[in-house]
Image (cartoon, grey):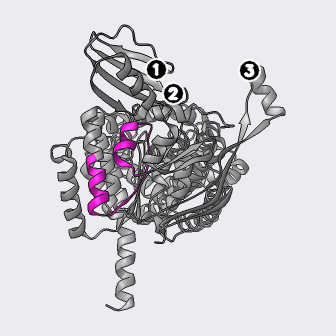
Amino acid sequence: MTSHTLSFFSWKKKRDKYLEIVKVQSKNTTTYVVNLFSRSLVILLRIWVFTQLYTVTYRVAGATRIDDFTLPMLIWTLMITQSFQNSTRPYVARIIEEEVKTGSLAYTLNRPYSYLLFHYAGFLGRILPSLLTNILVGIGVCLILVGPITFTLSGLAGGTVLLILGYLIEFSLMLSIGLLSFWVEDVSAFVWIYTKGQLVLGGVLLPLTLFPDYLRKITEMLPFAAVFYTPAKLMVSFQPETFWYYLTIQLFWVLLSILTAVFLYRKGIKHVSINGG
Amino acid sequence: MTPIIRVDHLTKLFHLKQKQPGFMGGIKSLFKPQWKDITAVDDIRFAVEAGEILAFIGPNGAGKSTTIKMLTGILFPTSGEIEVLGYNPTKQRQQLAFHIGSVFGQKPQLWYHLPSQDTFNLLAKIYELDEQEYHKRLSFLIEAFEIQDLLTTPVRKLSLGQRMSCEIVASLIHKPKVIFLDEPTIGLDVIAKQHIRKVIKYLNEKEKVTIFLTSHDAGDVEELAKRTIVINFGRIIFDDTMAKLKKRFITSKIVELVVENGTDTFNFPGGTVVGKTAFSLKVELDVAISSVERLIEYAFSHFIVKDINIFDPPMEEIITAIYQQKEHD
């Protein structure tokens, strides 16, 4: 065998281990299908509340469009954002924190793989089934409450590209928070700040479309919106120049969040003390 | 022979934040934190040859697990050198991981909601095992640990003993050259313990796997280890064969006497009667006060002796005696 053939097999084996982690994690997530769907029902409840709330907002404003968004477009954007965000539970930060607290880090660190990629593969394995059920429930709810809207192929494609990067930012930020548990053990305060930031400034609760123009421009540049809101917005209303603008912002946050996670891991690994006998 | 584990002047210090109890204590420690350095492992040196079964024992907090975690590369030493199978665990953790296995008895590695077979399949991929080689290995382990019927049961539904067998199988799937066993029989019943010991022995004898064992179970140590290292307060206080361990730490002997003429008059300095019937006596003799020879002489001069048996105290008591030694000893 040539050295190229050997390196191909070696690469394939390395790829396979991460794919297997995705597979096993997905299987683990779908063990309780009822549980999976009941978690998605939160979307139903929230979208119903949002529909009531923003119907009044549009009525009071006397407008059919706000920042070029109709009420159904706004609700669909919120549903997609909610579905993306809801699929990331349990958060990576919580999982790493648990590993440190219980000492199971002794196993997860002690394997022939990259610890960071191991968690990324686990993250993908968790979000895929949840995302599917969330979207299914969400589409059903939106169709009933506000009716259908028109999606374009470029919107879906562009939004998906941004979503993949958005998940990468979400993972890297939550990973960075999780890695802080190598120093402080309990990272719930950091998780709380980040998730609330996402709720308020990331378009999960309040659509950024409704913000004053200057505030919307600022928040769209923050990582909170770059994670889920901008992919969802682009799926509903696609404009090529907006796509490139959001992509540039995302690439900046992807780079920064990955570098932060790698830096914290390299520092933290020398600092960590594994609990228990 | 070249040792496959070499530890030289190894030290691990933990820098721990101290907190006063209560709300005010918490506030105080926010503004004026107090730190304390704990030396978990203090300048230890040892080497392990290929194929050895080494018991690494000591009381809670002695530094056993910290040492294992440094040997496997998941904790960074404060100072000193470690070499395992020619690798530096700190710098080559991933390469080393292909050749070592570890079982932490108090921590699970199996996926809780899935059958153990799923974890085994995942580990085969993680350790980059050839498909055929993996199935052959798994068949052997399934038979050795008698887990045929457990493979498709979700781990959460297994008993502790069944789960532990599967945990050990998960650690052996990639044919490691060295296995670190940290309390592998904790919480198990006698039968499960015996079974696990039997398989560990088999792996050592047939596959020449080096076993690095820490356990509070005297039975594990006595049945498996040929050499014992005792660590206390982070320092090695004993490193030799099991026979020498007994010799050094045994401070008493158990002498059983079977006599014909009654046992009520027994009175010997250093001898405490720990069991008695009309015609037999069980005496614990403090060898610092008197010797077994003198006790036998005394017995023959005062009783009509039909039989004498002399035992070492149980391993459990020996280990207790070692653990109770103070730091200055």
Work out whether residue B237 can be spotted: yes
Percent x, y of residue B183: 42, 41
Amino acid at circle 2: Ser
Q: Label 3, label 2: how many angstroms apart (C-alpha)?
A: 58 Å
The mark nearer the N terminus, 3 or 1, is 3
Check disc 1: other Cα within 10 Å, few if <14, some if 14-19, many if 20+.
Answer: many
Q: Mark 1 sits on what residue?
A: B271
Amino acid at circle 1: Gly
A102 within the magenta span: no
Asked if the residue under mark 1 is in contact with the one under mark 2, i.e. CB atoms within 8 Å, the reply is yes
Please report the bounds of the magenta region as a residue range.
B198-226
**Residue at mark 3: chain:** B
The mark nearer the N terminus, 2 or 1, is 1
Q: Label 2, label 1: how many angstroms apart (C-alpha)?
A: 8 Å
For discs 3 and 1, the disc positioned in front in the rendered view: 1
Work out whether residue A71 can be spotted: no
